[in-house]
Image: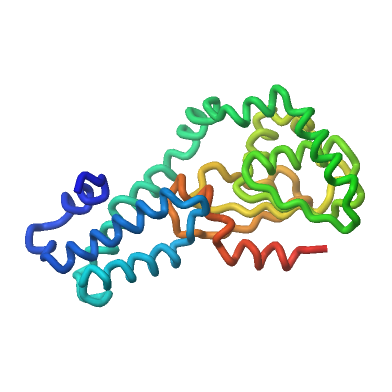
Amino acid sequence: AAHPLLGAAAAALTPDDLPGLAARGLTARVIAGVLDSDAPLVPTGATRDAVTDRLARTLGAPAPGTERGVRSLALRVAGSAASRAVVRRRRALTEAAHPAAGDVLRYLSRGEAVRAGLRTLLAGLEPPVAIVAHSLGGIIALDTLVLTPLPQVRLLVTAGSQGPFLYESGSLPSLEPPAPLPNHFPDWLNLYDPRDLLSYLGAGLFPGRVTDVAVDSRQPFPAAHSAYWTNPAVYRHIVDRLP
């Protein structure tokens, strides 16, 4: 009952918009949201909606479309609206939050051991090799491939990567702007979610060397940053580019 979703949704409704049956649908939305937050893999919006519908039916809520939009209102008020507001303030929030990202800062100051480990792993693989990396993993892979020619690697796939941001800000250890990517660098597919405020585009920084592709999980931030690997579109784009 104290879940913040309930208060936000109720405040946006007039009293006659929240009959008992619709309240059950809203409860289903809240439960589904809690399950999302506890899951090791964040589902896409379609999976989240399917869970909500199943819970709503179990709780005795009416069929979708007969609840006067209460369930969708909960998501709109507590998720999408908040996400849109954050997107509008992306630059300020990124600049405020980025210095607190301890794992990234540790890598930037003591990253050689991690890069050496990746080089050792790649050395034992038969070509063609595709590296698929998420978030900080994308930074590590980008750095390693810039610093070391690894001809067996034919494709780099990054998802939710801050690599372009670090390069543009002069913080990437291996490459300082305006230097281009070296000739030995492999094909680069960069997947980003428009709602993931920790994903950045690279094509404008490295013309002709990076392909940016949007994949929409329909999740608000920060869940969007962890929803890539339950999104079928991510795998379709990777398969299309595999060497």
The residue at the point 52 percent across, 59 percent down is 216
Quadrant of the image for the C terminus? Answer: bottom right
Furthest residue in direction front, as rendered: 58
Identify the image's colour scheme: rainbow, by chain, secondary structure or one colour: rainbow
Report x, y in % for residue 223: 46, 49
In this view of the protein, which residue sits in the foreground, 159 or 207? 159
Q: Which quarter of the figure has residue 98?
A: top right
The residue at the point 66 percent across, 68 percent down is 236
Q: Is residue 68 left or right of residue 199?
A: left
Asked if residue 63 is positioned above or below residue 170 in the image, the reply reads below
Q: Which quarter of the figure has residue 85?
A: top left
The residue at the point 75 percent across, 41 percent down is 142
Q: Is residue 152 left or right of residue 90?
A: right
Asked if residue 17 is positioned above or below residue 102 in the image, the reply reads below
Asked if residue 178 is positioned above or below residue 35 in the image, the reply reads above
In this view of the protein, which residue sits in the foreground, 6 or 210? 6
Report x, y in % for residue 66: 21, 75
Asked if residue 26 is positioned above or below residue 3 in the image, the reply reads below
Report x, y in % for residue 210: 74, 51
Q: Is residue 5 left or right of residue 114?
A: left
Report x, y in % for residue 25: 23, 65
The residue at the point 68 percent across, 49 percent down is 158
Q: How many marks?
A: 0
Furthest residue in direction left, as rendered: 15
